[in-house]
Image (cartoon, rainbow, N blue to C red):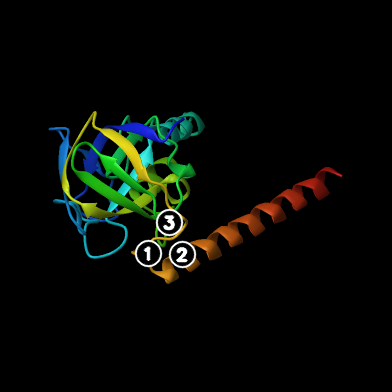
Amino acid sequence: MENIGHVRSVNVSERKGTRKKPVESGQIHIDPHHGVTGDAHAGDWHRQVSLLAWESIEKARASWASTWKVRATSPRSITTEGMDLLALPLGTQVKIGDEVVLELSQIGKVCHKKCAIYYLAGDCIFPREGIFFEVVTGGTVSVGDSIIVTKMGDGHCQYTPQEALDEIAKVRAEEAAEKAAKAKEAATANA
């Protein structure tokens, strides 16, 4: 995958904690330094617009096939296709269509309470594979619009509070320790 992709779907939710739904018109408006018009997650913070790769959704569909059929849309603001989102460092700027410029402000998130996707599928990939952006320049985003990296980040974003980064680092370290402990326990049991 390259650092060029396109918009596969656009989605909104009226309330936090609920599944985002595809916008029938295939178009959303994004307000500068605020987020998607009409979306519950828009606001004065660093996680204004969320992106998730179609490729991540396909991977989840394969692993959840026996428990739940993941729909063709994403639980995030914009579903992308053809772009390796997880290869982008903080501070990366992308241009979507002719107008919108977003700056990558957070990779993944900490789930303090389980979302609708988790309860339907038993897991949610967004905390590991979704990314968030601050809106630098607003405008309209439509299904099919191109997404281009216009500036590669250096691992820092002026909009991201340090507490958010620390919280994610702490949870990732706990997850890694738990995974290592389970592997050690399995190896001991098989010995």
Secondary structure of residue under mark 1: loop
Q: Residues within 10 Å of mark 3 (few under 14, many from 20)?
A: many
Image x and y of residue 119, in percent: 39, 47
Percent of width and height locating residue 109? 43, 56
Mark 1–mark 2 Cα distance, whole angstroms, equals 8 Å
Please name the residue that numbered disc 1 is placed on.
Answer: 160
Mark positioned earlier in the residue sequence (1 or 2):
1
Look at the numbered discs 1 and 2 and tell me whether their residues touch, using CB distance below 8 Å.
yes
Q: Report the residue marked by disc 2.
A: 165
The amino acid on which the numbered mark 1 sits, given as a three-letter code, is Thr
User: Which residue is rendered at x = 76% and y = 47% of the image?
Assistant: 186
Q: Earlier in the sequence, mark 2 or mark 3?
A: 3
- Of callouts 1 and 3, the N-terminal one: 3
Rendered view: 39 above or below 21? below
Which picture quadrant has residue 72? top left
x, y percentage for residue 18?
27, 50
Q: How far apart, in angstroms, are the residues tagged by discs 2 and 3? A: 9 Å
**For this rendering, which residue is in front, 29 or 91?**
91
Say if residue 69 shows up in the picture. yes
**Residue 178 drawn at (x, y percent):** 64, 57
Amino acid carrying label 3: it is: Lys
